[in-house]
Image (tube, rainbow, N blue to C red):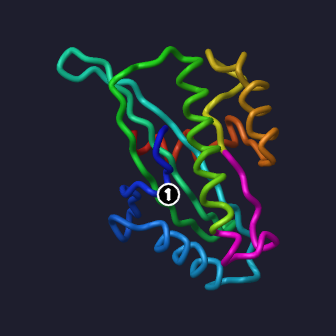
Amino acid sequence: MADSILSKNGFVSPSRGSVTIGQIIDEVSGFIDEDPKSLYRLVIGTDSQVKRVNGVNEIDYVTALIIHRSGKGARYFWKKEKLSKAPVLREKIYSETVRSLEFAHEIVPEIRKVIPEKKYDFEIHIDVGPNGSTRDMIKEVVGMVVGNGFTAKTKPESWGASSVADKHT
């Protein structure tokens, strides 16, 4: 990905429509300020879907940012990127993980300027699990995330990727 995710437009809030990174940060901050005593999780997850359009394979990558107030709801934002090349499964999972990591490295420092780390747990959700064809990749992609200093969650706990991002692929 040549361009920074933060420099691109295209994030969407289901309740507000198109939003800027500044608006996302304001929304996350405001959501936490509504109930400062609650526990929060800030989650980034990416999912992808290969589609055949007019005889050509293309892939949609969706990256989601979710602020979850434990037991009391959540807000989320998502961005879609289309590519014309459909990768093999291993490359697809790596690409999803790298997109989440790149976004985390860009947005987390911006969020930390406004919201202290102690107010939320940060997780990257990876769309791999112990069942199915991705089970052999768990250690590799979890290692990528942990090696970058973040907490990794896999199926069945990776709802940020497997449910929220998946909803928009």
The amino acid sitting under disc 1 is: Leu
Residue receiving disc 1: 6
Q: Residue at x 68, y 64 (%)?
A: 109
> Of 35 and 29, which appears nearest the observer?
29
Residue sitting farthest toward the front = 2
Residue 66: give x, y in percent of width and height.
57, 59
Q: Is 71 contained in the magenta span?
A: no
Does residue 26 sit above or below 8 in this rendering? Answer: below
Q: Is 116 contained in the magenta span?
A: yes
Q: Of helix, strand and loop, which one carries label 1?
A: loop
Highlighted magenta segment, given as a residue range: 111-124
Where on the picture, by quarter, is residue 38? Answer: bottom right
Residue 94: give x, y in percent of width and height.
61, 27
Q: Is residue 14 left or right of residue 131?
A: left
Residue 68: give x, y in percent of width and height.
63, 64
Residue 102: give x, y in percent of width and height.
60, 45
